[in-house]
Image: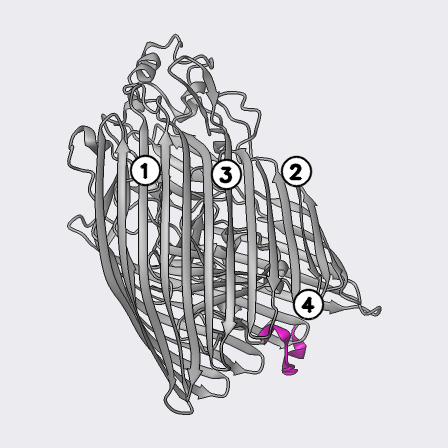
């Protein structure tokens, strides 16, 4: 049987409730806390997750801890039709989140992601810093499908809400520690202090480090490939002088460094390429592909500079003020100021080991020396930064069966990306610089109406204006200004089929402003190529069912059809001028379904499962164009068993299996070299909880089968660039202690 069919069929069968021999007690349909309805704010007002007329996955603090979820990469393993790749820039704080086949592979300032990430209502404009540490988080919500009305631009694939724990009235805290193989050491803490009846503050901190997956072959870098050291801190203060008014101030910072993500290059896979013609072969490189990542360059003065070390920093502060003017009318103000920066790069060819000695460009091989001197060494030391400021004013209320939320939104961003003067030796004078200033303004509203006892209707609209001013220097200078505007809208209906089961139908519209070329080396051949694409529009038709059909089963299911117009794919190639990245604009339709369920037949056993399927059709004259990084099938299954002990304590046994189908690394299906094979990951966990639930001690295993897989693949003419996974097998101990919470 085909591996894909077998994996999907197995997970689906288990997830839909396949009986197990250990479940003789299944007749006992006791109420389980695992089936309690989660309250979410996906529609910018509090609703039960079963009532929300869109596809939403919610991860509470308890779920995050039980499943060993650390960041968004882990979240992506347990959401149908969601894929998270570590493509961008080589550092761990940057991720590319794909929902229903929509996102962006690149990370440069002139590109915008198609999935919006929000922290306490604040939009994070850049991928750097988006891979948020999920320690002491109250809830994570994953909204699938275009969210253009309430969330605005850059949510044509979906949105992710991260809601942090606010300071509260009870003093206390929690601490966790973990240690494991591959040099894993980490921990986090949370402390809340109620100073008065009206003022409280909290402090959250986390640190983690882990060894890498191998040495750099090109040189002695002093760090390993994929080595990680990262810390973050968050401070929050809440002042609530009256029951009607409160103000929350937050500041957060994360800082990471280590070694580049695992990269390797398949040179001899492209026999027509220039590198192949010079005699450079993978057979000359290290056997372990994890060890083929490189990372050095030489500046114009001949100084040796290591780019194996990477860094990323992000910080920001926000103020949120809530004012309940009456029992039915409330204002909210959210102001935020954030910054991020990184240093990284790529060494795509690993060619230093081919020369035998690490003294290029002074090697003895004439062919290799010619490559170096003529600018085809494909090394990209890169730095980038972004500063953003946003403000949102919301008005919400209820009256006579109606409820509404409306708002004004403003967003400004300024940033840039540099690739240094030796980006290509053919152009030692030519800095690769992107700069962009962006402004966005919007007004929106959404209203809901309880038409009958069982029927709820809602509708909304948003008007957005965007302007981008961009300029670049790649030996050739160019600049351009472009503006866009769009009205996004949605209509939805939800029908309560029973006390615990809802049917819904939704039509959603999404919008994304156009974007300029990421790496415009096309300027050497076409001085007029520095132009922005048209804005992207999306319309999604969706029907779904969610709720609790039985006392022991909660579930949600959705069927969707989404139509995208003027969607840009990023296509990179090596040209005579440099590593050129252009926008391939296509129309695209997606159709699929999603399933999530939790089955808890007893208080001691539960089974959570997800299943997603998507089929994408790209309307382009070239029939070989395909949606990148979009697996046809995604699935997961998580059984959990609790063993009660005579002393009142308990042992919790848990397993998590996640499956991702094969997919293409770039938008061309006729190039088998960019095919990314499927992968199945297995996590195991066993933990002892003391009788008072004050502490626990556990054993964990992550990726216990040590599966090696590709996160992304690119074929820029002369070689295949492979971005490999960084989550090798890991086993360790974890400990948690509650201080009064």
Which label lies toward us, 3 or 2? 3
Crowdedness of circle 3 by 10 Å Cα count: few (<14), some, many (20+)? many
C-alpha separation, residue under disc 4 versus residue under disc 2: 38 Å
Write the start and end of the magenta stretch as one range: 23-35
Circles 1 and 3: CB atoms closer than 8 Å: no
Q: Is residue 250 magenta?
A: no
Which label lies toward us, 4 or 2? 4
Q: Earlier in the sequence, mark 3 or mark 2?
A: 2
Q: Secondary structure at mark 3?
A: strand
Across and down, in percent, residue 704 comes to: 60, 48
What residue did someone put label 4 on? 169
Circles 3 and 2: CB atoms closer than 8 Å: no
Left or right of 545: which side holds 683?
Answer: right
Across and down, in percent, residue 222 comes to: 57, 24
What residue did someone put label 3 on? 312
Crowdedness of circle 2 by 10 Å Cα count: few (<14), some, many (20+)? some
Q: Earlier in the sequence, mark 4 or mark 1?
A: 4
């Amino acid at each position: 049987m085909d591996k894909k069919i077998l994996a999907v069929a197995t997970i689906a069968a288990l997830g839909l409730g396949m009986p197990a021999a250990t479940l003789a007690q299944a007749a006992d349909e006791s109420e389980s806390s695992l089936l309690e309805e989660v309250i979410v704010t996906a529609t910018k007002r509090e609703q039960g997750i079963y009532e929300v007329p869109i596809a939403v996955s919610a991860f509470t603090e308890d779920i995050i801890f039980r499943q060993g979820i650390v960041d968004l990469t882990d979240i992506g393993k347990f959401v149908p039709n969601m894929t998270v790749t570590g493509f961008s820039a080589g550092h761990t704080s940057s991720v590319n989140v794909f929902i229903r086949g929509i996102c962006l592979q690149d990370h440069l300032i002139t590109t915008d992601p198609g999935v919006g990430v929000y922290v306490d209502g604040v939009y994070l404009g850049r991928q750097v810093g988006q891979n948020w540490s999920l320690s002491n988080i109250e809830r994570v919500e994953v909204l699938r499908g275009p969210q253009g009305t309430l969330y605005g631009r850059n949510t044509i694939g979906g949105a992710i809400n991260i809601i942090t724990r606010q300071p509260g009235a009870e003093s206390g805290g929690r601490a966790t520690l973990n240690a494991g193989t591959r040099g894993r050491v980490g921990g986090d803490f949370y402390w809340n202090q109620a100073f008065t009846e009206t003022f409280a503050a909290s402090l959250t901190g986390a640190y983690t480090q882990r060894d890498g997956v191998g040495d750099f072959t090109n040189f002695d870098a002093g760090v390993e490939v994929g080595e990680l050291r990262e810390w973050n801190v968050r401070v929050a203060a809440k002042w609530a002088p009256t029951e009607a008014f409160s103000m929350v101030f937050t500041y957060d910072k994360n800082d990471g460094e280590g070694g580049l993500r695992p990269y390797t290059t398949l040179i001899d896979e492209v026999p027509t390429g220039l590198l192949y013609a010079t005699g450079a072969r993978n057979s000359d490189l290290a056997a372990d592909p994890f060890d083929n990542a490189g990372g050095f360059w030489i500046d114009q003065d001949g100084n040796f500079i290591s780019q194996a070390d990477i860094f990323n920093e992000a910080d920001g502060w926000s103020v949120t003020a809530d004012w309940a003017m009456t029992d039915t009318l409330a204002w909210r103000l959210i102001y935020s100021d954030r910054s991020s920066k990184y240093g990284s790069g790529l060494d795509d060819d690993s060619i230093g080991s081919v020369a035998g000695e690490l003294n290029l460009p002074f090697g003895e091989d004439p062919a290799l020396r010619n490559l170096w001197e003529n600018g085809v060494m494909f090394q990209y030391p890169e730095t980038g930064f972004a500063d953003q400021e946003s403000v949102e004013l919301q008005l919400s209320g209820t009256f006579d069966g109606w409820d509404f939320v409306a708002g004004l939104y403003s967003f400004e961003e300024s940033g840039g990306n540099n690739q240094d003067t030796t980006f290509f030796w053919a152009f030692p004078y030519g800095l690769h610089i992107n700069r962009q200033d962006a402004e966005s303004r919007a007004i929106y509203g959404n209203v809901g109406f309880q038409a009958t006892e069982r029927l709820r209707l809602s509708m909304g609209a948003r008007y957005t204006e965007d302007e981008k001013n961009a300029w670049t220097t790649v030996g050739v200078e160019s600049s351009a200004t472009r503006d866009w505007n769009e009205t996004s809208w949605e209509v939805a209906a939800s029908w309560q089929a029973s006390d615990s089961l809802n049917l819904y139908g939704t039509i959603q519209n999404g919008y994304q402003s156009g974007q300029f070329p990421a790496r415009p080396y096309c300027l050497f051949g076409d001085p007029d190529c520095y132009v922005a694409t048209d804005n992207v529009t999306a319309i999604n038709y969706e029907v779904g069912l969610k709720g609790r059909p039985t006392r022991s089963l909660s579930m949600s299911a959705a069927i969707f059809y989404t139509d995208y117009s003027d969607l840009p794919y990023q296509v990179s190639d090596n040209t005579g001028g440099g590593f050129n990245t252009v926008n391939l604009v296509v129309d695209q339709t997606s159709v699929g379904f999603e399933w999530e369920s939790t089955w808890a037949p007893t208080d001691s056993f539960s089974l959570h499962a997800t299943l997603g399927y998507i089929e994408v059709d790209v309307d382009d004259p070239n029939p070989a164009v395909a949606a990148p990084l979009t697996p046809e099938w995604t699935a997961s299954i998580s059984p959990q068993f609790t063993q009660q002990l005579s002393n009142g304590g308990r042992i919790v046994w848990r397993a998590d299996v996640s499956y991702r189908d094969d997919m293409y690394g770039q938008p061309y299906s006729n190039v088998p070299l960019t095919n990314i094979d499927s992968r199945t990951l297995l996590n195991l966990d066993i933990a002892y909880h003391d009788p008072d639930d004050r502490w626990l001690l556990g054993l964990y295993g992550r990726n216990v089968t040590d599966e090696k897989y590709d996160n992304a693949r690119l074929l820029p003419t002369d070689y295949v660039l492979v971005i490999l996974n960084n989550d090798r097998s890991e086993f360790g101990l974890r400990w948690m202690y509650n201080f009064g919470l």
